[in-house]
């Protein structure tokens, strides 16, 4: 029997990537996080997972190699709600530390590990500094696979989905909205996947297959692509050498009409969403917030030491986390593609 794929999570938060990994049949091995409350929460749920601490002090060549590395690097400097300082911002530039660790592991393992990575961030990353930040993101990741690679910035700006095929590697990105993956909130995030071992990135990220949490189709099947998909995907050829441009069709997910309309939010969830009721307005509870993100009930309630986590810390941790079903969709594809190789 083939061993399970393994995963390492940088900027781990409350263990959203490891949780999705377990649901996908992937074994989480280690995580890096510096906030005390999230570490206590993940230690409770993953007692055997190693905690590596501060990302700036990690040497990728000295830690246990893993098949997949995930990193939802801090997005405050990329968000339209933030300062928009881009990768020059104090927190968002930590992205480069993650890339450094990935590169160090690739060198130490003769390019065997990691075989793939996932980067998650806000759509604002497409537009900071005129699109140069996202260009930096994909180029820095591409250079891990192949030195000297250059990827041009499209004059009209980055589209919400795209892919690049390199020499023995591939990279693709797509904006996923959590409301189409079975949770009642609108949460759009970029998911960028790199396949360092082959050309499967676009195949994985744009596949039409369902995933746990999908709902039945909301109507008759039409003949065209959903949501103007043909206008939201583009090819981005690698320059400075001969390369084959890669393009894939993005597929929409059918979803029930009531998904995404359960809650009417009037402010950022990190500070407490407001639910509009016929009889008034109230703040979303931490339990409801866990459900909004696809976590099991009570996921953030206690630390590994049995002590309660305060509501304010739970709100902050959940606001900085990921929509777990979206992560699982991507990891399901990575697991399946790996087993078929």
Image (tube, helix red, strand yellow):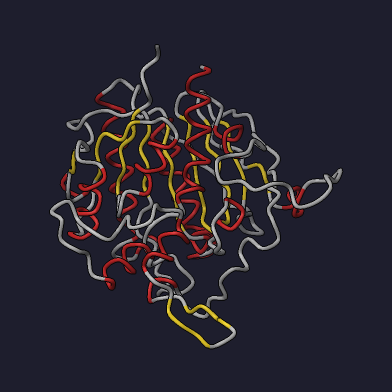
Query: Looking at the image, how many numbered discs can be counted on the residues?
Result: 0
Residue at horizontal 42%, vertical 32%?
Answer: 116
**Is 302 displayed left or right of 269 in the figure?**
left
From this viewpoint, which residue is outermost toward the left?
A: 305
Percent of width and height locating residue 121? 45, 56
Of residue 302 and residue 31, the one placed in the foreground of this image is 302
Query: Residue 175 location, x and y as percent?
Result: 57, 53
Q: Residue furthest front?
A: 279
Position above or below: 320 against 46: below
The foreground one among 9 and 285 is 285
Residue at (68, 53) in percent of width and height: 255
User: Quarter of the image holding residue 41?
Assistant: bottom left
Q: List x then y, in percent, for residue 136.
A: 44, 51
287 up-or-down from 134: above or below: below
Location of residue 233 with respect to 285 vertically, above or below = above
Residue occupying image coordinates x 62% and y 58%: 157
Residue extending furthest toward the right: 223
- Asked if residue 56 lies left or right of residue 97, the reply is left
Task: Specify the farthest residue to the top.
Answer: 1
- Quadrant into which the N terminus falls: top left
Left or right: where does residue 234 sit relative to residue 65? right
Observer-nearest of 92 and 205 = 205
- The image position of residue 54, as x and y in percent, is 18, 51
On the rendered structure, is 180 left or right of 143?
A: right
User: Going 30% across and 66% down the picture, which residue do you hit?
Assistant: 314
């Amino acid at each position: 029997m083939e061993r399970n794929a393994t995963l390492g999570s940088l900027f781990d938060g409350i263990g959203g990537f490891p949780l999705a990994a377990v649901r996908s049949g992937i074994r989480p091995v280690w995580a890096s996080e510096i906030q005390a409350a999230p570490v206590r929460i993940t230690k409770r749920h993953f007692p055997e997972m190693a905690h590596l601490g501060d990302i700036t002090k990690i040497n990728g060549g000295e830690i246990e190699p893993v098949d997949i590395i995930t990193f939802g690097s801090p997005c405050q400097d990329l968000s339209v709600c933030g300062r928009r300082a881009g990768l020059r911002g104090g927190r968002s530039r930590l992205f480069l530390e993650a890339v450094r660790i990935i590169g160090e592991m690739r060198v130490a393992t003769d390019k065997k590990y990691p075989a793939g990575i996932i980067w998650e961030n806000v759509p604002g990353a497409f537009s900071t500094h005129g699109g140069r930040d996202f260009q930096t993101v994909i180029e820095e990741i591409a250079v891990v696979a192949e030195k000297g690679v250059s990827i041009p910035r499209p004059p009209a700006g980055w589209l919400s989905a795209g892919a690049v095929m390199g020499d023995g590697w591939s990279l693709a990105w797509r904006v996923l909205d959590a409301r189409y993956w079975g949770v009642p909130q609108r949460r759009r995030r970029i998911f960028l996947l790199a396949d360092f071992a082959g050309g499967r990135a676009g195949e994985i990220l744009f596949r039409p297959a369902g995933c746990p949490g999908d709902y039945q189709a909301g109507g008759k099947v039409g003949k065209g692509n959903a949501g103007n998909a043909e206008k939201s995907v583009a090819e981005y050829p690698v320059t400075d050498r001969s390369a084959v441009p890669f393009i894939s069709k993005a597929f929409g997910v059918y979803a029930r009409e009531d998904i995404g309309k359960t809650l009417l939010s009037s402010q950022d969830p990190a500070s407490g969403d407001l639910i509009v009721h016929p009889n008034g307005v109230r703040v979303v509870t931490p339990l409801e917030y866990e459900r909004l993100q696809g976590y099991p009930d009570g996921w953030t309630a206690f630390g590994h030491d049995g002590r309660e986590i305060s509501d304010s810390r739970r709100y902050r941790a959940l606001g900085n986390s990921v929509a777990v079903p979206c992560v699982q969709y991507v990891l399901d594809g990575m697991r399946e593609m790996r087993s078929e190789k």
